[in-house]
Amino acid sequence: MKNYVQIGSNVGNDYFQKLINDLKEKSNIFLFEPNKVLIKDLTENYLEISKTHNVFIINKGIVVNKSIDKLYVYYQEPNVPNYGLTSIIHRKSYNNVLETIPMETTTFDEFCEEYNIKEIELLMIDTEGYDYEILDSIDIEKIDIKEIMCEHWGCEDDNLDESRNIRTGNNFLYSVIKPKFEKYYSMELVSFDEIPNDVFKKIPR
């Protein structure tokens, strides 16, 4: 059975859910959302899809370092502070932090081992700046991922993590993604609303 994975699902009703709606073949759908406030709406939005597919809603964050155990929650209009604008890392460009909340975590490798996943049709990552950390942690020799979508983050004033070399803009994309993925994926940037703007497609062999 084919596997589709979204890391940072929020409440659904997004581009990923539209793609799943169009699937004809019964598949496994894995939805990671660490903010427990959003789980009820996410579950309700996938009720219809769960009649056709195996939907796994996982109230955990995917992390590289298991010592990470909290989310930053940012104020977001219209007056719904917990409705989705959260990040594992504290982004200085978001100067409206309301609070931090605890979260359960797992690593991408642990997830694949738990569910015995060897192949993924589509991996979509939308984690408000943590996307490349997750990508860099994936053993692409071990897991066959056909297509990856993620957001291209790079802000001059953001202190992503003082413990590592900060790269921004196109240099971030080139330095973090290209060396690891160029052998396996063709890459393109897109700029449509609601669609993460880095797309990596497996190169046919």
Image: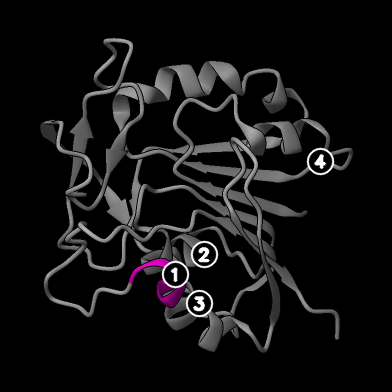
Nearer the observer, disc 4 or disc 3? 3
Marks 1 and 3 sit apart, C-alpha to C-alpha, by 19 Å
140 or 128: which is nearer to us?
128
Vertical position of residue 95 compared to residue 67: above or below: above
Q: Position of residue 99 (x, y in %)?
A: 10, 31
> Earlier along the polypeptide chain: callout 1 or callout 3?
1
Which residue is at 49% across, 53% downward?
151
Secondary structure beneath dot 1 equals helix
Main SS class of the magenta portion in the image = helix
Q: In the image, what residue occupies the spot 21% across and 49% down?
A: 91
User: Which residue is more in the foreground, 194 or 106?
Assistant: 194
Cα distance, mark 2 to mark 4? Answer: 19 Å
Q: Residue at x 40, y 73 (%)?
A: 172
Quadrant in which the C terminus appears: bottom right
The residue under label 1 is 109
C-alpha distance separating marks 3 and 2: 21 Å
Left or right relative to 163: residue 43? right
Foreground: 90 or 139?
A: 90
Question: Residue placed farthest to the right in the image?
Answer: 24
**Label 3, on which residue?**
177
Q: For the residues marked 2 and 1, what is the alpha-carbon distance in whole angstroms?
A: 5 Å
Marks 2,4: beta carbons within 8 A: no
Q: Sequence order check: which comes first, mark 4 or mark 3?
A: 4
User: Where, by quadrant of the figure, is residue 189 drawn?
Assistant: bottom right
The residue range painted magenta reads 168-172
Residue, disc 4: 26
Q: Is residue 87 above or below residue 157?
A: above
Residue 112 disc label: 2
Q: Could you tell me the amino acid type at mark 4?
A: Lys
Q: Position of residue 133 (x, y in %)?
A: 36, 68
Label 2–label 1 contact, CB within 8 A: yes
